[in-house]
Image: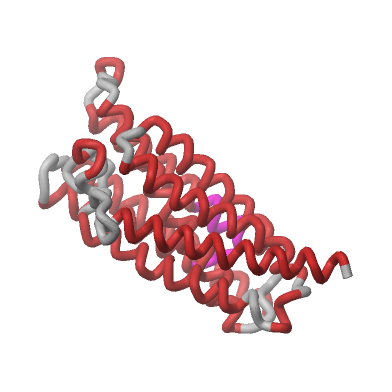
Amino acid sequence: MATRSSDLLRQITVTASLVVCIAGSMIGVGVFGGTPIAQAAGGALAADSTLLAPATPAFSIWSVVYTGLAAFTVWQWLPSQRCSMRQRSLGWIVAVSMILNAAWILSVQAGWLLLSVLVILTLLMTLVLAFLRYSQSPAGSWVEAVVVDGTLGLYLGWTSVAVCANIAAALKASGFGGFGLRPEVWSVAVLVVVAVVGIALAIKGHGRLALAAAIAWGLVWITVGRSSNAPESLPTAIAAAVAAALVLGAAITVRTRAVLAGR
């Protein structure tokens, strides 16, 4: 009985967290009177604010992520999922991630960029924990693979890129001078780290394509932004494009090998 009660509490909490997350996203786009993220905090997170800011179309991935989170919430209410060990392992973590998502939007709206960095780093760690947990066991069906693994993969992948843009924006707003190094040195170094992390996640996750695709998506739009919009930076654009190719290529290679080994 206690287990059933905790399962129900988890399902209700995930649902409530989704409502908070969606409400936060509506504030983030200005629907409820809030300032759109690109204009909040003095435009610190606009597409032309730093070398690591993706071009505006990149942010359309949020609509896919939110749709996936809604599908995840519905999925966890199915009778077959109430007592699912996977849901018991992931439900609370996903709920926390959605609350953190809303908290990040509100912190940016308030102009608290340093706080927003702490929030998004916590969100990233939460999603990494979810990744480590769902990577331990395969999805029970293709629907679960899409709704659970796919959604959380996109969520983590995009957040991995967003963290870099957020930190760069906060450092610029605080007057960070780069210790005398050119901005391109920092941007390329960060993109190298993103590539290494993306490849590591591809290996650890046995080539999960949604995760790699989301990272590549963000990196490609950094390439577009730095090659066609201010501030233009050819080294940054090239580094982002190479990083995107490496991450996606690693995931495809690992997945192909896994499939062949399975056969």
Query: Is residue 42 left or right of 152 when viewed as pictured?
Result: left
> Residue 163: x, y in percent?
41, 43
Q: Residue at x 49, y 56 (%)?
A: 156
Residue 204 within the magenta-colored segment of the rendering: yes
**Residue 14 location, quadrant:** bottom right
> Residue 203: x, y in percent?
58, 57
- Residue nearest the viewer, comparing 167 with 260: 167
Query: Is residue 253 left or right of 32 when viewed as pictured?
Result: right
**How is the rendered protein coloured?**
secondary structure
- Residue nearest the viewer, comparing 89 with 82: 82
**Residue 66 location, quadrant:** bottom left
Q: Residue at x 57, y 72 (%)?
A: 73
User: Is residue 98 in view?
Assistant: yes
Q: Quadrant of the C terminus?
A: bottom right
User: Is residue 222 in view?
Assistant: no
- Residue nearest the viewer, comparing 6 with 230: 6
> Residue 137: x, y in percent?
72, 68
Looking at the picture, does residue 120 appear above or below residue 252? Answer: above
The rendered magenta stretch, by its main secondary structure, is classed as: helix
**Residue 244 location, quadrant:** bottom left
Taking the view exactly as shown, the residue that stands out farthest to the top is: 180
Query: Is residue 142 left or right of 42 when viewed as pictured?
Result: right
Q: Residue at x 26, y 61 (%)?
A: 31
> Residue 248: x, y in percent?
42, 62
Per the rendered image, the range of residues in magenta is: 199-209
Taking the view exactly as shown, the residue that stands out farthest to the front is: 33
Residue 263 within the magenta-colored segment of the rendering: no
Q: Quadrant of the N terminus?
A: bottom right
Q: What number of labels is visible?
A: 0
Q: Residue at x 21, y 56 (%)?
A: 56
